[in-house]
Image (cartoon, grey):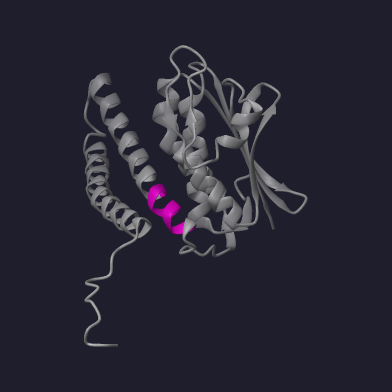
Amino acid sequence: MSDDAPDEGPARLTTDDASSSLLATMVHDLRNPLSALTGNLELLHEEFAGLELGPTARRCLDDSIALCTRALLMVQSIADVDALEQGRITVRRSVTPLGPEVDAAMAHARVNAEARDLTVAVVVDAELTAIVDGRLLARVIQNLVDNSVRYAPRGGRVVVAAGIVERTFTLSVGNSGPALTADERVAVFERDYMSAARKAGARLGRDFGLYFCRLVVEAHRGTITVEEHAGLPAVFVVRIPQ
């Protein structure tokens, strides 16, 4: 190179590189205090287990744990979406017991389900196993359960079922809320999908967790769709070949 060549200075980050770096920093900065807060709240829950707390105090503590757990799930989903999009997460399949994962997801959603007076049914064999990446699929189950509970109508139903059908692991999570239109059934799995209110009291929300679910399921060479079953107008169905 000629000595007269201009000094180009330090390499510049592309917009994508800068966004990924900022995202990684935000996730790290949010995850640590949220993890500590969740741990402290759970310790308080154990300490207060033998005490006579009023119903409001007990409900507030349970709600705080549920909200922190949900926030942690959202933060981790953001980090993993970025990694999945860039191919930095490899699906590592192994024989995975899924009954405990469904139980854990239902436990996380219990406070919200009770607050909304929902009837919840779980149809999953305790001995069910599938050849999947257990860490990633556990998060898919938790996201879908959380989504169904949050958007079920007050006093409605949520049904979670899973099994092996024709050498395909099948998971369905649905509620008795309003059905999605044909366009919504496709768009709901996009990164920037915004669900508009279709009835009074419905909340506007970014279903980022559903995009994460789609990426994980597709990385397993599976599919995720929205279907309508008897009594359940909105059912999210995951199918992963075994």
The outermost residue toward the front is 4
53 lies above or below 188: above
- Looking at the rendering, the stretch of residues picked out in magenta corresponds to 77-84
Q: Position of residue 133 (x, y in %)?
A: 54, 59
In the picture, the quarter occupied by the N terminus is bottom left
What residue appears at the point 24 percent right and 39 percent down from the top-left corner?
Answer: 41
Residue 235 makes an appearance in the image:
no
The outermost residue toward the bottom is 2
Say how many tags the image has.
Answer: 0
Residue 174 makes an appearance in the image:
yes
Residue 121 quadrant: top right
78 lies above or below 18: above
Q: Position of residue 68 (x, y in %)?
A: 30, 39
Q: Position of residue 199 (x, y in %)?
A: 50, 14
- Tell which of 132 and 57 is nearer to you: 132
In the picture, the quarter occupied by the C terminus is bottom right
What residue appears at the point 38 percent right and 53 percent down from the top-left corner?
Answer: 79
**Magenta stretch containing residue 28, yes or no?**
no
The outermost residue toward the top is 200
**Magenta stretch containing residue 82, yes or no?**
yes
What residue appears at the point 56 percent right and 47 percent down from the top-left corner?
Answer: 214
Residue 205 falls left or right of residue 228 = left
- Overall secondary structure of the magenta section: helix
Residue 79 falls left or right of residue 51 = right
The outermost residue toward the right is 166
What residue appears at the point 47 percent right and 62 percent down from the top-left corner?
Answer: 89
Q: Position of residue 22 (x, y in %)?
A: 28, 54
